[in-house]
Image: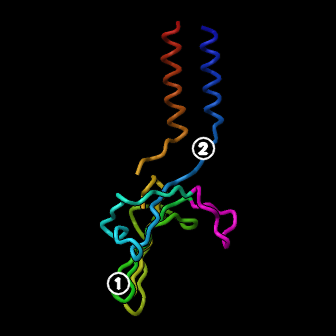
Amino acid sequence: MKFSMFTLVKVFLLLIFIENAVSIKCWECRSDADPKCSDPFDNTTLAITDCKQLRSLDYLPNVQATMCRKIRQKVHGVWKYIRSCAYLGEPGLGGDERFCLMRTGTYNIFMEYCTCNTKDGCNTASSLKLQSLLMWCSVLAFITCRYLR
């Protein structure tokens, strides 16, 4: 019983000190190169990109992509969609991902920027949070200790 409890404590301490890496996967495509990138979005033939694997940009050294972005733009009546990892910005408007930033200009120009970071493919499995992992380990430890008595 002491060995099992000691092992359980070691596993629990190990889980506490695991670094929670921030990474998100996003769709990367342009509708001018692939019509499936436009709306309605068809991702059946596209591979999702792990933004953590992308190298940092020359003009933004040491900045990692931590969000997904979808840009919808109309220039002279032609719609174009761009989906990518995002290096800068904030999710949605005021932190609310349901709202996108919209801009219009002269000569029939319209742009909409949607940025998100709540789940993979938000531009499609949610990431496991360390807190929920620790909660389930605590429940498992409680059940195990109760049955070992």
The answer to the question of whether label 2 and label 1 lie on touching residues, with beta carbons closer than 8 A, is no
Q: Position of residue 91 (x, y in %)?
A: 49, 62
Prevailing SS of the magenta stretch: loop
Instruction: Give me the residue at 50% from left, 36% from top.
Output: 132
Residue holding disc 2: 20
Q: Look at the image and give the residue range highlighted in magenta.
A: 52-65
In the depicted structure, whether residue 111 falls above or below residue 49: below
Quarter of the figure that contains the N terminus: top right
Q: Residue placed farthest to the right in the image?
A: 61
- Spatial distance from mark 2 to mark 1, Cα to Cα? 42 Å
Label 1: which secondary element: strand
Q: On the image, which quarter does residue 74 sit in?
A: bottom left
Quarter of the image where one finds residue 96:
bottom left
How many numbered marks, from 0 up? 2
Disc 1 marks which residue? 78
Q: Which residue is the extreme one toward the left?
A: 40
Placement of 57 over or under 4, stated as above or below: below
Identity of the residue drawn at 62% across and 60% down = 64
90 on left or right of 108: right
User: Looking at the picture, how far across and down is residue 147, in whole percent?
Assistant: 48, 10
Residue at the (51%, 19%) spot, across then down: 142
Label 1 amino acid?
Val
The stretch drawn in magenta includes residue 62: yes
10 Å crowding of disc 2: few (<14), some (14-19), many (20+): few
Q: Is residue 121 above or below residue 30?
A: above
Specify the amino acid type for callout 2.
Asn
Q: Residues within 10 Å of mark 1 (few under 14, many from 20)?
A: few
Q: Position of residue 51 (x, y in %)?
A: 55, 58
